[in-house]
Amino acid sequence: MIQQLVHIDQEIFLAINQGLSNPVFDWLLPILRNPYTWAPLYLFLIIFFIKTYGKTGILIVAMTLITFGISDGISSHLIKKNVKRIRPCNDVEFKENVNIRVRCGSGFSFTSSHAANHFSLAFFWIVLFRRRWKYVLWLCIAWAFLISVSQIYVGVHYPFDILCGSALGILVGLATGYLFKRFVPSFFKTEQV
């Protein structure tokens, strides 16, 4: 049963990593998964949250960092170190099939911390802003999804790593979002429906 699941995971991986190959994705997806690409967005959000919401904005920034820290800690330090799944680009028996488009890295594959971290931020912000900003739900999900799928395309994660990392991130983001809602209810009373 496990071997069958691994085989399905590898087949889906190849469908994305090889089957979707094209010059545009070869250029774009490595950029999307690079954390430095998003540094201007993060800086903008920090300034925007603090300038727009004052002291509550500082709490939003702090809780955003806590959300990231929780998801990254669980994914990178708890799950990866215990599961120890080899990345597709490092798997001796499989890597000859992999189009490696970025540096592979020596860490483990399961769960994807990129997926966990970006989905946790996305869902934290969705809880906070979905009634204030009409398109925040779809923008956040599309952003996290593109970054996550990029991990498969560039050859560093299997789809199951992404799926489980995304699920972890969603749970963490919802938990911290609702924790924020519980302790800062005044922020949600001024929402526009």
Image (cartoon, rainbow, N blue to C red):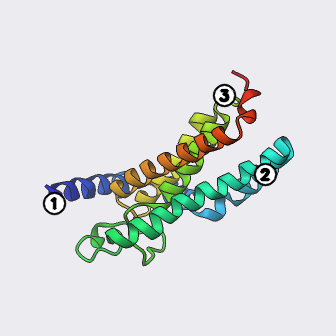
- Can you say whether 71 is above or below 89 in the image? above
Residue 158 position in % (x across, y down): 34, 59
Question: Mark 2 vs mark 1: which is more N-terminal?
Answer: 1
Secondary-structure class at tag 1: helix
Which kind of residue does numbered mark 3 sit on? Answer: Arg
- Can you say whether 52 is above or below 29 in the image? above
Distance in Å between CA atoms under marks 2 and 3: 20 Å
Which kind of residue does numbered mark 1 sit on? Answer: Gln
Q: Is residue 59 left or right of residue 104?
A: right
Name the mark nearer the viewer: 2 or 3: 2
Which kind of residue does numbered mark 2 sit on? Answer: Ile
Residue bearing the label numbered 3:
131
Residue farthest toward the top in the current orientation of the protein = 193
Name the mark nearer the viewer: 3 or 1: 3
Residue bearing the label numbered 2:
58
Of 78 and 86, nearer the camera is 78
Q: Quadrant of residue 54?
A: top right
Q: Is residue 107 visible?
A: yes
Residue bearing the label numbered 1:
3
* Circle number at residue 75: none
Question: Mark 3 vs mark 1: which is more N-terminal?
Answer: 1
Tell me the residue at 58%/35% (across/down): 137
